[in-house]
Amino acid sequence: MATAQLSQPIRIHKETVFPSQITNEHESLIMVKKLFATSISCITYLRGLFPESSYGERHLDDLSLKILREDKKCPGSLHIIKWIQGCFDALEKKYLHMAVLTLYTNPKEPEKVTEIYQFKFKYAKEGATMDFDSTSTSFESGTNSEDIKKASVLLIRKLYILMQNLGPLPNDVILTMKLHYYNEVTPNDYQPPGFKEGVNSHFLLFEGEPVNLQVGLVSTGFHSMKVKVTTEVTRVSDLENNVFQENNTTEIAHQGLDCDEEEEECNNHIQRMDFVYSQQSLESPRKKRKVSEPVKVFVPNRK
């Protein structure tokens, strides 16, 4: 599955990112939180959204990672950290289905996006479906801690490779994050810290042809996190697609936001127009997921 450049010898460092073993649900939750925060840190660091002072250094095998920290000199870092903490609250309660980090350039047209980062979560117990698709089970009994670590290392490596191969962002870029929930367990009035009620819509536009890149899937036996990135195909034209293959089959697909098993038919209803891409959810009002959005979007000072 992995290429030679992705499988390097393991080296032990004093300050590691993830727990050395996962034997219960609490340790699994810590793992998933750290993996999510590390991924968001990777994206913001390598896309040049914050100064060096907004990051601390940690290690994952031979990778030196930059992790977001509270930097009072950089209000923007506090902004994103608050979003992450809001996601933590929803994860702890097993409400969070998907966190979608979106970058766009026109505040009047947030549906016209530049990059989309999807983090899809599953839980082994109480109210969440265990399968990522109808033919395979995401959770395995007795999941080995070393296998979890290897999957996490691979996910972060692939995310780093992708970030380093994406074209530069425009100077004027805006960030927002939408949280999608499991309706059957999430109270109607629930909002995590830093978020307000949002609009449930899968309608998004790209100026060019979009491409989905499956970055990775990590399952602990208690939680599972799947990461997907969507951007314009011309911005990743130099990327070796085999890095993003699974089981020798390419994982690149012209689709939009992930659909659940019972909603897979929406993959077949993609409206294509000249220079724009859109996908509309065919969910009935009864099936529409509860959604949150930040109280305030974030505009980094990158000029």
Image (cartoon, grey):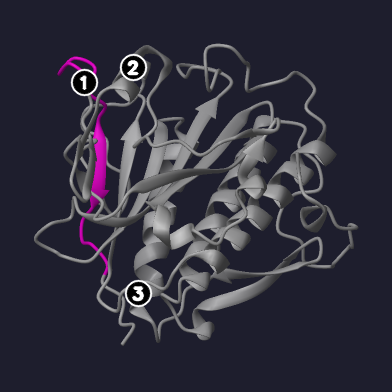
Whether residues under marks 1 and 3 lie with C-beta atoms below 8 angstroms apart, the answer is no
Q: Read off the residue under disc 3.
A: 76
Label total for image: 3
Whether residue 235 sits left or right of residue 22 in the image: it is left
Whether residue 273 sits left or right of residue 265 in the image: it is left
* Cα separation between marks 1 and 2: 8 Å
Pick the quarter of the image with the N terminus.
Answer: top right
Q: Residue 6 appears in which quarter of the rendering?
A: bottom right
Whether residues under marks 3 and 2 lie with C-beta atoms below 8 angstroms apart, the answer is no
The correct choice, above or below, for 268 with respect to 155 in the image is above
Whether residues under marks 1 and 2 lie with C-beta atoms below 8 angstroms apart, the answer is yes
Sequence-wise, which precedes: disc 1 or disc 2?
Answer: 2
Q: Read off the residue under disc 2.
A: 263
Residue 203 placed where, x, y %? Answer: 20, 39
Q: Amino acid at mark 3?
A: Gly
Sequence-wise, which precedes: disc 1 or disc 3?
Answer: 3
Look at the magenta stretch and give its main secondary structure. Answer: loop
Q: Amino acid at mark 1?
A: Leu
Local SS, label 3: helix
Q: Amino acid at mark 2?
A: Glu
The correct choice, above or below, for 78 with respect to 233 in the image is below
Residue 23 placed where, x, y %? Answer: 77, 32
Q: Residue at x 41, y 82 (%)?
A: 72
Residue 51 placed where, x, y %? Answer: 47, 84
Q: Read off the residue under disc 1.
A: 282
Asked if residue 285 lies in the magenta stretch, the reply is: yes
Within 10 Å of disc 1 (Cα), the crowding (few <14, some 14-19, many 20+) is some
Local SS, label 2: helix
* Residue 67 in sight: yes
